[in-house]
């Protein structure tokens, strides 16, 4: 599907969609817990559906309800023989469930699609092998898993995906031994680990955390006791999603009228609530009150923002920086190369094709702001955040913008274009 966007400022208020990051975690905890869990999650996405599909495959019945999903935990005996899992293009599903499947010890064949095979699994795969798991060669599908994960001490560098740590933490209550995960400092994307700790706490599992020295290195140690057991709280509500709300707040920062997002927890452990501080740093006016966050334009000016811990904010921040006076540097953005697209390249190319000025300097994205972008034709490159960024830029461009492959927003936000229209955006979708 291609989308033609005509320039028209966005304004008004929109409700935040459920957090994809939190939904993954709560679904997995529910599947592994004692007792049935009703998860309040009024909207799903392709990635959430991938996790649901895989949990069903390993023996956890999941039923759709009017308010979300009812998760019945894995039945006695769990998987009968090796399970077949299709994780789609969801890196979270793969990295979370790989240790879980290994902890269940029944074996699995895992299939993935898109660029997922190119996205790294090392050193998680090495740690799994050291703890009793047999894996086929990483970097290609199908991925064959056999053996049973044992507990003990796992060691990971801090500059790799936090999803490795989260997957091991969610698998830990299934093991008979204590689990200690040593992550060398500095720990990037630490907020996502905190989100996992919060999800586990909702199901009665405590993760202790302390700084330790290991082999001469300072590490953050995450520990789960051998007696830890996941117990359903009965009902869980998935909180609002800051990562996708960031695009609407970016639109507010570019417009002349405020744009508000409701249903956001300003005390959330989601790291992407940093969008409030980042937009303020760029000169936008940001206000918050009782779950409502609003952004509007003031005097936008370029700044240096370290996005190493908030890589999903790079795209909406780039949209604002493109129209901010001076130069913005989104620093330490190398992790963007490992997303659904090489997002460091595709963000740059999108801005260039829309009449902006941007370049890559090692792992930094450097953007020189202009009063307005011109509009043009861009390829979303199969990346949901590139499509959403392009739509936000297009609303404030001088001329129309065509987004090729715009259907990829369904990976995280299927109703994005409907919500875009509800805020006053003018868009025409065309099947191709």
Image (spheres, rainbow, N blue to C red):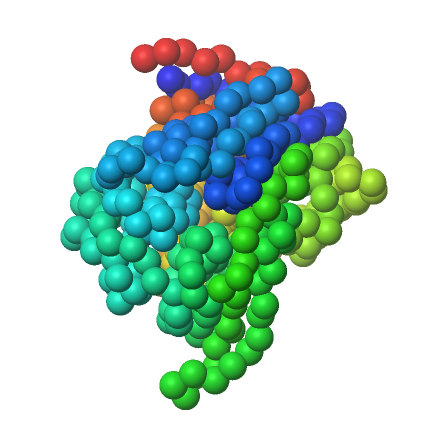
Task: Name the residue at 48% across, 55% down.
Answer: 173
Horizontal relation, residue 418 to residue 287: left or right: left
Task: Name the residue at 46% across, 18% down.
Answer: 4
Residue toward you, 36 or 296: 36
Question: Could you say which quadrant of the image residue 190 lies in?
Answer: bottom right
Residue 60 appears at what percent x and percent y? 43, 33
Horizontal relation, residue 287 to residue 48: left or right: right
Residue toward you, 299 or 145: 145
**Quarter of the rendering occupied by the C terminus:** top left
Horizontal relation, residue 384 to residue 261: left or right: left
**Quarter of the rendering occupied by the N terminus:** top left
Q: Is residue 296 above or below residue 276?
A: above
As drawn, which residue projects farthest toward the front?
76
Residue 172 appears at what percent x and percent y? 45, 58
Question: Could you say which quadrant of the image residue 38 lies in?
Answer: top right
As drawn, which residue projects farthest toward the right?
289
């Amino acid at each position: 599907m291609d989308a033609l966007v005509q320039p028209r400022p966005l304004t008004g208020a929109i409700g935040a969609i459920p957090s994809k990051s939190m939904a993954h975690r709560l679904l997995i905890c529910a599947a592994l817990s004692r007792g049935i869990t009703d998860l309040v999650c009024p909207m799903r996405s392709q990635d959430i559906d991938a996790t649901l599909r895989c949990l069903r495959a390993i023996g956890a019945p999941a039923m759709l309800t009017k308010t979300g999903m009812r998760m019945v935990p894995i039945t006695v005996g769990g998987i009968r023989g090796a399970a077949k899992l299709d994780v789609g293009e969801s890196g979270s599903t793969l990295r979370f469930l790989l240790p879980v499947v290994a902890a269940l010890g029944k074996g699995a064949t895992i299939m993935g699609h898109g660029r997922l095979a190119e996205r790294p699994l090392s050193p998680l795969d090495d740690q799994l092998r050291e703890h009793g798991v047999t894996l086929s060669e990483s970097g290609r599908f199908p991925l064959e898993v056999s053996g049973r994960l044992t507990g003990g001490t796992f060691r990971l560098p801090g500059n790799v995906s936090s999803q490795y740590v989260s997957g091991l933490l969610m698998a830990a209550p299934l093991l008979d031994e204590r689990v200690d995960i040593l992550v060398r400092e500095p720990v990037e994307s630490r907020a996502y680990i905190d989100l996992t700790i919060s999800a586990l706490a909702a199901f009665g599992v405590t993760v202790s955390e302390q700084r330790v020295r290991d082999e001469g290195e300072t590490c953050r140690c995450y520990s789960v006791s051998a007696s830890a057991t996941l117990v359903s709280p009965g009902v869980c509500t998935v909180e609002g999603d800051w990562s996708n709300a960031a695009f609407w707040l970016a639109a507010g920062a570019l417009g002349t009228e405020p744009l508000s997002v409701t249903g956001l927890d300003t005390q959330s452990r989601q790291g992407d609530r940093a969008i409030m501080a980042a937009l303020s740093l760029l000169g936008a006016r940001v206000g918050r009150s009782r779950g409502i966050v609003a952004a509007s334009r003031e005097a936008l000016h370029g700044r240096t923002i370290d996005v190493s811990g908030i890589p999903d904010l790079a795209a909406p921040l780039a949209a604002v920086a493109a129209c901010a006076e001076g130069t913005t540097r989104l620093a330490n953005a190398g992790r963007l190369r490992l997303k659904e697209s090489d997002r460091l390249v595709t963000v740059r190319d999108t801005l260039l094709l829309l009449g902006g000025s941007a370049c890559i300097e090692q792992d930094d994205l450097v953007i020189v702001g202009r009063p307005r972008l011109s509009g043009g034709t861009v390829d979303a490159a199969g990346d949901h955040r590139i499509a959403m960024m392009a739509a936000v830029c297009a609303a404030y461009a001088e001329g129309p913008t065509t987004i090729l492959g715009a259907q990829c927003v369904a990976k995280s936000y299927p109703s994005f274009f409907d919500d875009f229209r509800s805020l006053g955006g003018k868009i025409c979708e065309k099947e191709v």
